[in-house]
Image: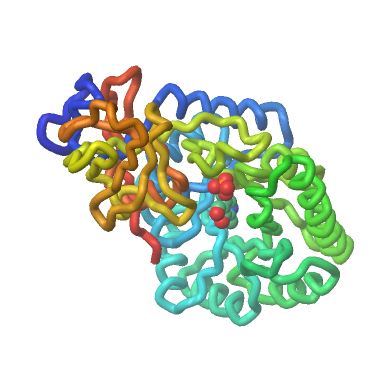
């Protein structure tokens, strides 16, 4: 365990702050609930580790039935392989010579798959893999609408791409990625469902075109926490990439049909109470991301968090008689789990108010 006086069994409020807390009971219920959804299904969970960035968590997801994991970045995949994970899909294109060289080196030690949407990139991957004496598994990345991400458009033109791809002997076509990212936060559920079914139809049509042209499309992967209940039951999809479900955040908690528990919080300390209506907390941009709005107070919903800069947060106190003073500890719900986790070195894993373990967030900052 790292840090002064940090040992199993201490009370959560004895931890120094800011500290990222993981409520183990809620976290385990989230793992089990998602695992149960896929248990007797031909569809498998391949959770996205861009959320948790922690090989210990990835191993727990695999122990609960996941087939492997997704990584968004090569640096994350390197950390996961070091942490003992073997089956990894890298969900973004790897295109520079330096990264391609890291990728094929890593592929000698793990079962790696990577997405592609460009034939020049396929040629570079194939040459690098061939030079290492390996064949690299690739999935064609499909643009799932709104043109806000990578991927080639669905439809029969994907056949031509696949025909070019298979001429390159250093790569092997395994399937399609169709990640419908922009749909995750569409409320209500019925509207999300309608949009999702429409775009999934186009993905399946593309799969059929490819199969009729003689290609074996083994893997069709997509889906996230906001759509797993739709995409994960769509015939033909066989892997789901949900990530945030594992810890949730206050933004996802507002999304209909996403019934997981918020297991993540940031513990902070009040460092000043300059006036009746204001206090200052040691949690700023460097401990809580605000790209999805401010964090909120866990057991004091009447308090409002306002940004106070890199290191500090301002607490707006509506009830002036509230006895909040320097040294008091408060827990905050993060508004966006991925970007908040990336700010911390460790999860402080808590059960019933006591510290049980400290788990390094080994993949934090590994954005290259
Ligand atoms: C390609 C891809 N798959 C899956 C996910 C996981 O989504 P969520 O955290 O909403 O479950 C993401 C998140 O951004 C993603 O980019």
Quarter the C terminus occupies? bottom left
Q: Residue furthest left?
A: 4
Front one among 336 and 175: 336
Would you say residue 131 is visible in this rendering? Answer: yes
Front one among 120 and 353: 353
Q: Position of residue 285 (x, y in %)?
A: 32, 54
Q: Position of residue 3 (x, y in %)?
A: 14, 38
Residue 181's place in the image compared with 29, above or below, is: below
Residue 289's place in the image compared with 16, above or below, is: below
Q: Residue at x 68, y 49 (%)?
A: 186
Would you say residue 211 is visible in this rendering? Answer: no
Q: Position of residue 204 (x, y in %)?
A: 82, 55
Q: Residue at x 49, y 52 (%)?
A: 292
Front one among 198 and 156: 198
Quarter assignment of residue 9: top left
Q: Position of residue 6 (x, y in %)?
A: 16, 30
Quarter the N terminus occupies? top left
Q: Residue at x 63, y 48 (%)?
A: 185
Q: Residue at x 86, y 58 (%)?
A: 205
């Amino acid at each position: 365990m790292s840090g002064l006086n940090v040992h199993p069994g201490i009370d959560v409020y004895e931890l120094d702050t800011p500290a990222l807390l993981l409520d183990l009971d809620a976290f385990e219920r989230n793992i089990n609930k998602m695992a149960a959804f896929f248990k007797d299904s031909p569809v498998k969970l391949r959770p996205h580790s861009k959320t948790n960035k922690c090989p210990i968590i990835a191993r727990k997801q695999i122990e609960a039935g996941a087939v492997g994991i997704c990584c968004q970045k090569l640096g994350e995949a390197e950390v996961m392989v070091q942490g003992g994970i073997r089956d990894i899909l890298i969900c973004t294109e790897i295109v520079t010579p330096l990264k391609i060289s890291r990728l094929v080196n890593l592929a000698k030690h793990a079962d790696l798959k990577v997405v592609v949407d460009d034939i020049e990139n396929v040629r570079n991957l194939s040459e690098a893999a061939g030079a290492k004496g390996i064949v690299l598994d690739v999935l064609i990345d499909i643009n799932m609408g709104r043109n806000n991400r990578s991927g080639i458009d669905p439809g029969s033109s994907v056949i031509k791409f696949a025909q070019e791809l298979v001429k390159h002997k250093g790569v092997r076509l395994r399937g399609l990625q169709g990640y419908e990212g922009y749909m995750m936060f569409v409320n209500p559920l019925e509207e999300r469902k309608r949009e999702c079914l429409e775009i999934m139809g186009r993905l399946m049509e593309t799969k059929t075109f490819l199969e009729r042209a003689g290609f074996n499309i083994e893997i069709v992967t997509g889906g996230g926490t906001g759509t797993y209940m739709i995409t994960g039951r769509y015939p033909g999809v066989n892997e789901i990439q949900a990530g945030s479900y594992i810890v949730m955040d206050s933004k996802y908690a507002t999304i209909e049909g996403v019934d997981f528990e918020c297991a993540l919080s940031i513990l902070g300390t009040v460092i000043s109470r300059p006036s009746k209506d204001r206090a200052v907390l040691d949690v700023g941009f460097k401990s809580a991301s605000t790209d999805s709005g401010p964090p909120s107070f866990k057991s004091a919903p009447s308090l409002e968090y306002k940004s106070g800069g890199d290191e500090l947060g301002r607490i707006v106190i509506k009830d002036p008689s509230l006895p909040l003073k320097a040294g008091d500890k408060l827990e905050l719900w993060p508004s966006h789990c991925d970007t908040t986790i990336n700010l911390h070195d460790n999860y402080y894993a808590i059960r019933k108010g006591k510290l049980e373990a400290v788990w390094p967030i080994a993949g934090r900052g590994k954005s290259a």
